[in-house]
Image (tube, helix red, strand yellow):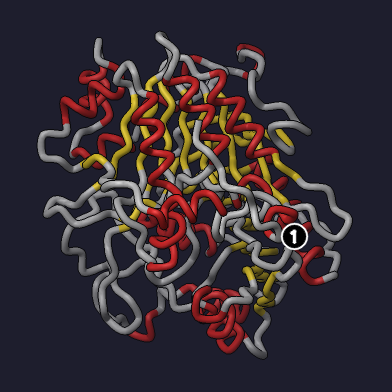
Amino acid sequence: MEPIANKPAAQRRGTTVLKPGDTCWRIEDSRRAAFLVDNEAYYTALLSALQTAESSIHILGWAFDPRTRLAPDGTEGPEDSDEMGRILLDLCRARPDLEVRILVWRSPFGVLGHQDIRGHRAKRWFAGTRVAFREAHDVPFGACHHQKVVVIDDRLAFCGGGDIVTNRWDSPSHRHVEPRRILPDQAHHPARHEVTLLVDGPAAAALGTLFRERWTGATGTILGETPPVSAEPWPRGAPSQLSDARVGIARTMPAWRGQPPVDEIRRLTLACIAAARETIYFENQYFTCRSVADALAARLGERDGPEVVLLVSGRAPSWFDQLTMDSARNPLIRRLRAADAFGRFRALSPRTSAGALIIVHSKVAVFDDQVLRIGSANLNNRSEGFDTECDLVIEGDTANSRRAIAEFRNYLLGHYLDADPSEFSRAMTGAGVVGAIDALNGAGRLAPVALGPPTWWEDFVFARRLGDPSSVAESWRWRAPQVLG
């Protein structure tokens, strides 16, 4: 993807959906912004950025595994020097003033929560070192800390949907056989899709403030401001698709211990769906949120409404998610297909060249060429008000930024279809996004999500929001059955 520079701020349009205190927390400037597609790009940029750290490295995550390799080559390297844990320890030894803090969720569910990748291994790894590893338990029972952010010196920040865990690496080619998708035991994990947004300047500093607030909430320790640093930390070789971008920061925080709920992401999602004119594009791990499905169904019922494209995994990788999230997703997709009177809806699942499922773990939303969202929030009920979430939002307030948003969406869709953004854009002429997908999908790399006939279990899970409440109050209430409209 080629760099695109914005016009000066004075030539921008006013924002339309970003409203601090309503649909976002803050709007801050970023001198540069980069869209990092798949964790090959993210981990490469992170590896470079870590070397520039002078004062602080702050990490928020749902999970963290110190054995995660940032530059895997398909083999076990000498001492695995690209392992995240070793890198952080080496940096601490080389830089006595560097402070490294990691905050991940403390799961109460043991095996179901894969506790090993959240806490136990990292606790052992960093015990007695200068890396401060803590677990967040300042959320209601059953809720999780789900924000995924890395902030370096309050000057550079990554925010996306992927954690620093051993089974997250993949390249945009999503090869059917990929030796670099290697686990610590030398086994290989499936193809996986992730997206991260890289920002700097005041936007990165604001994410530093977010980290300090989360750290205080979880540990009770108040952190001081990060001292000024001399280095310019932009990762070597990283792209910059936007310059002088305005970045919205939207959050979810549950109502808990006297704190009111924060539902900026829910408000933003619904505002963006209502404002879309031509295309709504989602990539997401889940699709179980009734309010989102209601809003999409209403737009699909409009004669001149937008196209709606939803990319999800054909099947969740864990048996628990298959029983709960997949089962709750199916009724909503059936409903949207039934509401699609004008042929504008596609629910699709990506495949490798040999037909294997690609796990979609990204949390991306693109509305026309106007709004781009990248972050941690899923399209499930939990992300509306039960878990902690953080999304970054860029609004297309110049011609160049709108072009960058459209090219990014076309790149995402094209990379599944072996088509570059310009090819996808040409296929859209007179046909729209849905027509371009249909035209370029001869090899079936984007397959319709297969549902099968409705089952009593799907009805039960959907009606009770099993494992997927939207609030603290709902998590303790045996809900009356939901009825689809």
The amino acid type of the residue labelled 1 equals: Arg
Say above or below: 267 vs 229: above
User: Residue 359: image x %, image y %?
Assistant: 33, 56
Disc 1 crowd, CA 10 A, few/some/many (<14, 14-19, 20+): many
* Residue found 67% across the figure and 70% down from its top: 101
* Residue found 52% across the figure and 58% down from its top: 49
Using the image as rendered, state which of residue 25 and residue 41 is in the foreground: 25
Q: What element carries label 1?
A: helix
| For residue 351, side relative to residue 23 (left or right) | left
* Residue found 37% across the figure and 81% down from its top: 80
Q: Mark 1 sits on what residue?
A: 214
* Residue found 21% across the figure and 42% down from its top: 447
Using the image as rendered, state which of residue 417 and residue 2 is in the foreground: 417
Classify the position of the N terminus by image quarter.
top left
User: Residue 233: image x %, image y %?
Assistant: 57, 52
| For residue 157, side relative to residue 46 (left or right) | right
